[in-house]
Image (tube, rainbow, N blue to C red):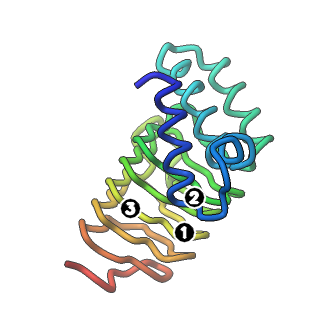
C-alpha cells in the first residue's frame, strides 16, 4: 500500500471512529493520531532501508508535534486509530495488527534493555483503553479489549477482556 492509499484509509477510519470529526480535512490537519501515524509510515520506510537517522528525525518531529512517540522500527497494521493520543508510546519491536484502536496514554513498552524482541505484539481488532500499559514480549490476541489503566504483563488470548493491575482476564469467549 502506498502513502496516498494509506493516508486515505487512515482518514476514513478516523472519521468512522471519531464522531466529533466534521470533515476529511479536519481529520488530516487536526487529529494527532492521524498525523503521528502518517509520519510513522514515512519514518518506518526509512528505517527499513537502514536510514536510521532520517527515520529518527521524522519520528522525533512527530513526537514534538503530536505528543505521540512511535519508534520508527515499530510495525503497525492497517486502519489503526489512536484517539486523542497524547502520551502514547510505542516501542521499537512492537507489532500492531489491523483495526486496532487505542486511546491516550497507552504504552507498548519493554522490560529489558537488550537488542531482542522486547515489546508487545497486538493482534487484529483490539481496543486498548486510556492509560493501559502493555509491557514485554507478550502477545495480545485478536478481538481483545484491554481496560483503561490496565497493566498487562502476560499474554491475553483471543476474544478476551483484560482489566486491572496486574491485568486479569474477566471475559473469555
In this rendering, the answer to whether 125 lies above or below 146 is above
User: In terms of image quadrants, where is residue 143?
Assistant: bottom left
User: What residue is rendered at 34% in x and 67% in y?
Assistant: 144
In the displayed structure, 130 sits above or below 88; it is below
* Label 1 sits on residue: 132
Q: Earlier in the sequence, mark 2 or mark 3?
A: 2
The x, y position of residue 36, in whole percent, is 65, 41
Q: Residue at x 47, y 35 (%)?
A: 115
Q: Which mark is residue 107?
A: 2
- Kindly report the distance in space between the C-alpha atoms of the residues bearing marks 2 and 3: 14 Å
Q: Which mark is first along the chain, 2 or 1? A: 2
Q: Secondary structure at mark 3?
A: loop
Q: Determine the residue positioned at 38% across, 77% down.
A: 162
Horizontal side of 132 relative to 79 (left or right) equals right
- Within 10 Å of the Cα at label 3, are there few (<14), some (14-19), or many (20+) other Cα atoms? many
Kindly identify which residue carries mark 3. Answer: 126
Q: Position of residue 63 (x, y in %)?
A: 73, 41
Say which of 9 and 23 sits in front.
Answer: 23
Which disc, if any, is residue 66?
none
Extreme-right residue of the structure: 64
Tell me if residue 141 comes above or below residue 68 in the rendering.
below
Amino acid at each position: 500500500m502506498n502513502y496516498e492509499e494509506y493516508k486515505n484509509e487512515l482518514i476514513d477510519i478516523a472519521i468512522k471512529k471519531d464522531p466529533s470529526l466534521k470533515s476529511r480535512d479536519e481529520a488530516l490537519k487536526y487529529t494527532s493520531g492521524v498525523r503521528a501515524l502518517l509520519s510513522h509510515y514515512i519514518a518506518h520506510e526509512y528505517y527499513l532501508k537502514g536510514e536510521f537517522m532520517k527515520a529518527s528525525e521524522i519520528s522525533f518531529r512527530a513526537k514534538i508535534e503530536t505528543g505521540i512517540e512511535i519508534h520508527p522500527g515499530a510495525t503497525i497494521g492497517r486502519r489503526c486509530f489512536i484517539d486523542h493520543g497524547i502520551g502514547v508510546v510505542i516501542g521499537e519491536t512492537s507489532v500492531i495488527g489491523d483495526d486496532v484502536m487505542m486511546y491516550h496514554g497507552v504504552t507498548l513498552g519493554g522490560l529489558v534493555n537488550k537488542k531482542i524482541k522486547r515489546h508487545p505484539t497486538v493482534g487484529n481488532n483490539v481496543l486498548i483503553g486510556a492509560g493501559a500499559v502493555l509491557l514485554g514480549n507478550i502477545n495480545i490476541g485478536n478481538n481483545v479489549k484491554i481496560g483503561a489503566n490496565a497493566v498487562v504483563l502476560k499474554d491475553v488470548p483471543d476474544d478476551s477482556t483484560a482489566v486491572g493491575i496486574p491485568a486479569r482476564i474477566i471475559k473469555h469467549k
